[in-house]
Amino acid sequence: MAAIEYQNVCKRFSGSDAWAVDHVCAKIETGEFITILGSSGCGKTTLLKLTNRLYDSDDGMILIHGEDIAGKDPVELRRSMGYVIQQVGLFPHMNIQDNITVIPRLLKWKKNDMEKRACELLELVGLEPDKFRKRYPSQLSGGQQQRIGLARALVLDPEIMLLDEPFGAIDAITRMNLQNELLRIHGGLKKTFLLVTHDINEAFKLGNRVMIMNAGRLLQFDTPKNIVKHPADPFVQSLIDSAIMQEQFWKDA
């Protein structure tokens, strides 16, 4: 059974004549690392937010492990998934341990259980628990804050992780290191990851399959190798050409 299935999913915002998401059909298997690639306004973030019902679709159906999410409580659905955003969204008045365990506190976990889980997750994202758990967000670098955001999203051990351009505001070296960390974490956890990016190099590095979107439509959904060998249309070809031109610049430098 697929982890996520999109069946003719559509979304149009009020005041717009165009579909933000235009009859998208795709099936994501359990344990895959899927990246969604496209330029700004192509519908990739909207599709992600439809998946956890931050938005509701206007037509079509989204299935999570075979169950239509339209019949699920939105809060419970979101708690069942990890969600990481570019801005991180850490609470500045809370220390790192308390930031990680926001939801467990709402669910009234025992204090010892929350502390243990926070330490486990700090180790998972490559931060020493004794060194970081009592610090505050302002005492961390952007890359460290993003690791905390990832830890917080993993706190309830969700089967599906949604990541919306998590490294978009981070410098190139830190971004590359975090990409490698994310691949390591995914490989160890075997969860289903769905990551939005506008960076073709990031999309092809991280995704075992890549969804390429433009103007709300899903143009191609395949492995990076097959996309490069057999681009589905001129837009996909233009993305590949841009990556080749960037690579050529460094070869010629």
Image: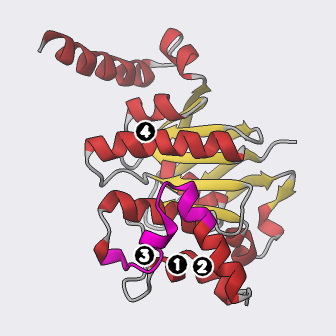
What amino acid is found at the position of numbered circle 4 in the picture? Gly
**Residue sitting at the far front:** 130
Residue, disc 2: 101
Question: In whole angstroms, how far apart are the C-alphas of marks 3 and 2?
Answer: 11 Å
Q: Give the mark toward the camera: 2 or 1.
A: 1
Within 10 Å of disc 2 (Cα), the crowding (few <14, some 14-19, many 20+) is many
Q: Give the mark toward the camera: 4 or 2.
A: 2
Classify the position of the N terminus by image quarter: top right
**Residue sitting at the far left:** 253
Sequence-first tag of 3 and 1: 3
Residue, disc 1: 97
Residue, disc 3: 90
Residue at 66% in and 71% down:
117
Sequence-first tag of 3 and 2: 3
Q: In terms of secondary structure, where does tag 4 sit?
A: loop
Sequence-first tag of 1 and 4: 4
What amino acid is found at the position of numbered circle 1 in the picture? Gln
What stretch of residues is rendered in magenta?
120-138
Sequence-first tag of 3 and 4: 4
21 shown above or below 94: above
Marking on residue 38: 4
Residue 77 percent across, percent down from the top left: 73, 69
Classify the position of the C terminus by image quarter: top left
Q: Give the mark toward the camera: 3 or 1.
A: 1
Sequence-first tag of 4 and 2: 4
- Is 204 contained in the magenta span? no
